[in-house]
Amino acid sequence: MTYSEVQAIVQLSVGLNVGIFALKELSIPYLTRQRNDFASLRAYLGEAKELIVQIPTIETREEKLQHWNILFRKVMRIWPQSTSIRRGLDHFIFFMSVAAGIAAVLGLWMLYDTSQYYSQQIPNHFLPTVSLCYAPLLIGAAINIYARFMGYRLMREQKSIQQELSKLI
């Protein structure tokens, strides 16, 4: 196999590794929105308690406060999950960016080699090295999909709590 035969594969690797930097821009706003929705849910929970405390009948007030406490515990259970997902994603984004940068530089070097030695045979280590250049893209896509799934699950849970809270008031 010659360098000319793998040049397009190397070009694709370089382009995708440069494009992987945009992948982090897709996850961050989604999780930020989830955190903002969570903050508004906590504020809504506080407003609901103020309204419940003002109910004149003791039995109704106690019943609604018990239901409010259940919802409050659900919200407090979501908070650490949301925080750990965000923290994990922040670490991932840093390492993914570094890995993609290294893979892009390595790909550019390999692209230079393919143009310099266009008609010569490639060495044995060249194809496995090209394969390594695709690793940050695959790992980044998988973790981005996972983060969005976890964020969606938390947002769905927050919405159900908010709906229950609306029924309570």
Image (tube, rainbow, N blue to C red):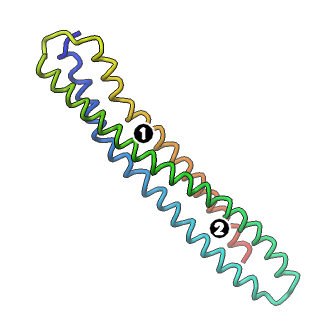
Task: Name which quarter of the figure residue 107 lies in.
Answer: top left
* Secondary structure state at the residue bearing disc 2: helix
| 165 lies above or below 22 | below
**Residue shown at 19%/9% (left/top)?**
121
Kind of residue at disc 2: Gln
- Tell me the quadrant of the picture where the C terminus can be found: bottom right
Eye-nearest disc, 1 or 2: 1
Between 91 and 35, the residue placed more toward the observer is: 91
Q: Which residue is mark 2?
A: 162
Locate residue 160 relative to residue 106 in the image: left or right.
Answer: right
- Mark count: 2
Q: Position of residue 119 (x, y in %)?
A: 13, 12
| 20 lies above or below 50 | above
Q: Which residue is mark 1?
A: 140
Name the outermost residue toward the left: 116
**Residue shown at 13%/16% (left/top)?**
118
* Label 1 packing within 10 angstroms: few (<14), some (14-19), many (20+): many
Q: Position of residue 63 (x, y in %)?
A: 84, 75
Give the spatial CA distance, label 1 vs label 2. 32 Å
Locate residue 132 relative to residue 126 in the image: left or right.
Answer: right
| 44 lies above or below 24 | below
Kind of residue at disc 1: Gly
Locate residue 164 relative to residue 92 in the image: left or right.
Answer: right
Q: Which of pointers 1 and 2 lies earlier in the amino acid sequence?
A: 1
Q: Position of residue 101 (x, y in %)?
A: 29, 39
Q: Position of residue 45 (x, y in %)?
A: 66, 74
Between 34 and 99, the residue placed more toward the observer is: 99
* Secondary structure state at the residue bearing disc 1: helix
Mark 1 and mark 2 residues within 8 Å of each other at the beta carbon? no
**Residue shown at 30%/17% (left/top)?**
127
**Residue shown at 34%/18% (left/top)?**
128
